[in-house]
């Protein structure tokens, strides 16, 4: 049934001449227009964004022109297709992300994903930065050595592959009987924001997993403070570098085979302190916010799209490595680890949202509890950075991110 439906839609769009089309309108509504690196890239791109209707075309060509199209089949046969663009506000933005397991069908996963804020509050209370707003203008031109084994796109974006270790291993009593080494497709860009250099990357695994993460490197900002709020850097104990958080937000517009039918669920396992763990499912019908729990996870599921076992296709979100920073009342957007909003084009950043017609921050987006018809997921991952002598220039990269894992996208191990 699902197979037939997907083929039917693809054929209909092909007949209508919509597959592979460029020049749609949605890109312009979501694209800011100021000068700089982002503008140059976008001007060359034409319109890289896809109309929402066209995005419902499963398995069709991404609606972007070739320099902005990424189409990679990894060694195990897993294929990822997506488009990239460099937006002024959010920087590197990936759209029309489609995953095809080896021998399987294409499944639309994300209509778009991008950073939504890097909030950097210092421990003494000041300063407090909101680093994203025009980050696209701060993209760094990469050298070929900065994109090992890959290709640079318009100088600012690297598309490459990277080993991800043991995909699986199994023994039969006489030793290893079968094993495989996994591979990730990696798309990244680097940005210079003050003293910090931020590496912004998405890894797309040959097992269907997506790992968005950000690496902070470059130089410490050099803010000094009292011993209660910092750590001694350099010779002796005279200069205390101020500790701070990097609270990174991602916006993920999931569209599992189009925007219709997507539902966000939360899973908990009750029974702490007893011998049992009972599954507790919570369906989010309205815009909401949620906090992390040690065994808690979420998924975006579309019951209208089934795998060969007739289980609904879903993508699981784990946010288990966050420092869970909670700021003061005027930074209420920091007080949850995951938000779900109904799609609105002008809701682009988690704080200091610049777009007219919408609220300024995530906590305001969910305040009206609007019924969810096309859910957008926002993930907040914090890292508390207490400087150390090893952070001397150039500062080693510290990474933070989260995991998106396929749950019942295929009926068996895809790798
Ligand atoms: Cu830091």
Image: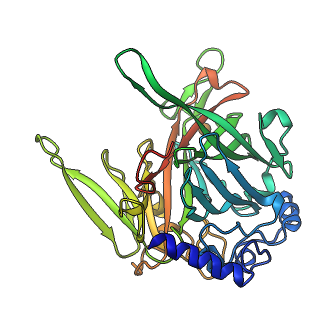
Query: Looking at this view, is 301 or 253 the one in front?
Result: 301
Task: Please tell me whether residue 395 is drawn above or below residue 404 in the rendered image.
Answer: above
**Where, by quadrant of the figure, is residue 75 drawn?**
top right
Query: In this image, 152 relative to 294: left or right?
Result: right
Q: How many marks?
A: 0
Instruction: Report x, y in % for residue 410.
Output: 45, 54
Residue 119 seen in the current view:
yes
Residue 411: image x %, image y %? 40, 53
Q: Quadrant of the N terminus?
A: bottom left
Relative to 176, say whether 337 is above or below: below
Is 271 left, or right, of 229 in this rendering? Answer: left
Furthest toward the left, the residue is 274
Query: In percent of the image, x 57 and y 44: which residue is there?
Result: 206
In the image, 18 versus 49, the foreground residue is 18
State the residue at coordinates (59%, 78%).
9
Q: Residue at x 46, y 27 (%)?
A: 178
Query: Can residue 38 be spotted in the picture?
Result: no
Ligand number 1: quarter of image: top right
Measured from the top left, where is residue 367 in percent x and y?
42, 75
Between 185 and 340, the one nearer to me in the picture: 185
Please provide percent x and percent y for residue 146: 79, 35
Q: Residue at x 83, y 41 (%)?
A: 142
Locate residue 172: give its quadrant: top left
* Image side of residue 80 versus residue 338, left or right: right
Protein image colouring: rainbow
């Amino acid at each position: 049934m699902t197979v037939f439906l997907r083929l039917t839609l693809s054929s209909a769009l092909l007949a209508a001449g919509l597959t592979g089309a460029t020049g749609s309108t949605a890109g312009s509504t979501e694209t800011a227009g100021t000068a700089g690196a982002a503008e140059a890239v976008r001007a060359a791109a034409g319109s890289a964004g896809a109309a929402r209707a066209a995005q419902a075309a499963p398995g069709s060509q991404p609606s972007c022109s070739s320099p902005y199209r990424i189409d990679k089949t990894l060694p195990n046969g897993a294929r990822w297709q997506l488009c990239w663009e460099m937006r002024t506000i959010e920087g590197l933005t990936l759209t029309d992300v489609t995953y095809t397991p080896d021998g399987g069908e294409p499944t639309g996963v994300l209509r778009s994903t991008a950073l939504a804020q890097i909030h950097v509050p210092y421990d003494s209370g000041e300063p407090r930065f909101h680093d994203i707003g025009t980050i696209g203008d701060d993209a760094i031109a990469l050298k070929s050595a900065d994109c090992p084994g890959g290709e640079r796109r318009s100088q600012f974006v690297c598309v490459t592959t990277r080993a991800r270790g043991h995909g699986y291993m199994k023994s039969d009593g006489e030793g290893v009987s079968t094993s495989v080494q996994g591979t990730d497709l990696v798309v990244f860009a680097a940005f210079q924001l003050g003293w910090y250099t931020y590496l912004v990357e998405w890894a797309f695994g040959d097992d269907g997993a997506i790992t968005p993460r950000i690496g902070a490197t470059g130089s410490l900002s050099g803010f000094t403070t009292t011993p209660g709020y910092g750590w001694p850097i350099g010779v002796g104990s005279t200069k205390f570098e101020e500790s701070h958080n990097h609270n990174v937000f991602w916006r993920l517009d999931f569209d599992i085979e189009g925007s219709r039918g997507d539902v966000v669920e939360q899973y908990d396992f009750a029974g702490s302190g007893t011998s049992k763990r009972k599954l507790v499912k919570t369906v989010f019908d309205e815009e909401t916010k949620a906090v992390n729990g040690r065994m808690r996870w979420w998924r975006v599921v579309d019951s209208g799209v089934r795998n060969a076992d007739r289980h609904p296709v879903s993508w699981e979100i784990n946010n288990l490595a966050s420092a869970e920073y909670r700021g003061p009342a005027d930074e209420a957007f920091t007080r949850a680890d995951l938000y779900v909003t109904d799609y609105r084009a002008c809701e682009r950043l988690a704080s200091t949202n610049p777009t007219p017609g919408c609220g300024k921050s995530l906590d305001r987006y969910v305040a009206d509890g609007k019924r969810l018809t096309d859910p957008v997921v926002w993930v907040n991952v914090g890292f508390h950075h207490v400087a150390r002598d090893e952070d001397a220039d150039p500062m080693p990269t510290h990474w933070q991110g989260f995991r998106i894992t396929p749950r019942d996208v295929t009926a068996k191990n895809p790798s």
